[in-house]
Structure formats: C-alpha cells, structure tokens
Image (cartoon, rainbow, N blue to C red):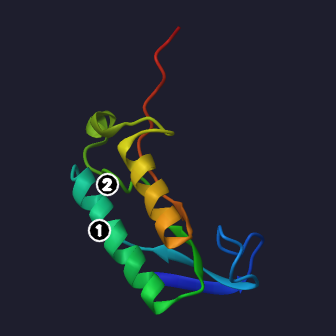
C-alpha cells in the first residue's frame, strides 16, 4: 500500500534533468519479513516498480524503518548491520534508484565502525 503525495518539490526532476515540476512522493507501507534481508530487498523492488507504474511522476520513495531486516528481536538486529556506503542494501538501492531515476530512503541497521 502506498500513500502518494504530488506537488512541486525541490529537485523534482529526475537525475537526467527530465520531468521538471510536479513530482510525487510515495511512502510505501510494506511488511518486511524479520531476518529475510534478501527477500525484503526483492519486495521493495517489486513494490517500487508497481508504484512507478501507477504514478509515473514518482521521484521519491520512503520505506519503513529497519526495512532490510524488519523488527525482529532487537537484540539480534546487529546480525544484519552493514556499512552505510557499500553494504548490500546500499548497493542494491543505489542501483535501483539509478535504474528507475528516483530517490529512495530506507531504514537499516548500520554497522559501527571499528574503534581506532
């Protein structure tokens, strides 16, 4: 289920500079499965593609907090932590955003840097 808002937002044009003006923002209320990071990424890809098919002016997509691993037992979330710049989900969503010409915000457990 997507809540879609249309309007004129700063940076509303696509990365290639097309479609200036009115663009849409979608908050996708998805239900990721706890511990199924790979399946959750595929769920996001499928639902983002469906939202784009219904709303071609879509430029921004917001996914739930801790989307990649879902809320399971919070003491286990660290198992799914990853690097914010080059982790699996960062690479996945960067590629998806480029492919679709959109911006994607999502939640994931971030890996803490090793102490010096």
* CA–CA distance in space, label 2 to label 1: 12 Å
Closest to the observer: 111 or 95?
95
Residue 35 pos. (x, y %): 22, 49
- Residue pointed to by mark 1: 43
**What numbered label is drawn on residue 12?**
none
Question: Residue 54 at what x, y percent from top left?
Answer: 45, 91
Q: Return the x and y of residue 69 as percentages of the image width and height.
A: 30, 50
Which of label 2 and label 1 is nearer to you? 1
Q: Nearer the viewer, residue 83 or 67?
A: 83
Q: Quadrant of the N terminus?
A: bottom left
Depth check: give the residue in front, 41 or 115: 41
Disc 2 packing (10 Å; few <14; some 14–19; many ≥20): many
In the displayed structure, would residue 113 be above or below residue 107? above
Q: Position of residue 37 (x, y in %)?
A: 27, 51
Q: Which residue shows up at 61% across the image and 84% down it?
A: 5
Q: Secondary structure at mark 2?
A: loop
Residue located beneath label 2 in the image: 70
- Image side of residue 8 versus residue 80, left or right: right
Q: Earlier in the sequence, mark 2 or mark 1?
A: 1
Furthest-front residue in view? Answer: 16
In this rendered view, identify the residue nearer to me: 57 or 101.
101
Q: Quadrant of residue 44?
A: bottom left
What's the residue at 65%, 73% (across, down)?
Answer: 14
Seen at 69% across and 83% down, the residue is: 19
Direction from residue 33 to residue 14 in the image, left or right: right
């Amino acid at each position: 289920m997507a809540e879609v808002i249309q309007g004129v937002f700063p940076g509303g044009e696509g990365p290639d500079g097309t479609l200036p003006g009115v663009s849409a923002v979608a908050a996708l209320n998805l239900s990721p499965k706890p511990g199924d990071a790979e399946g959750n990424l595929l769920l996001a890809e499928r639902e983002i593609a469906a939202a784009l098919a219904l709303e071609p002016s879509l430029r921004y997509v917001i996914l739930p907090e801790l989307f990649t691993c879902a809320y399971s037992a919070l003491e286990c979330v660290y198992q799914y932590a990853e690097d914010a710049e080059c982790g699996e989900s960062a690479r996945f969503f960067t590629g998806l955003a480029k492919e679709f010409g959109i911006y994607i915000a999502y939640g994931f457990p971030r890996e803490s840097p090793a102490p010096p």
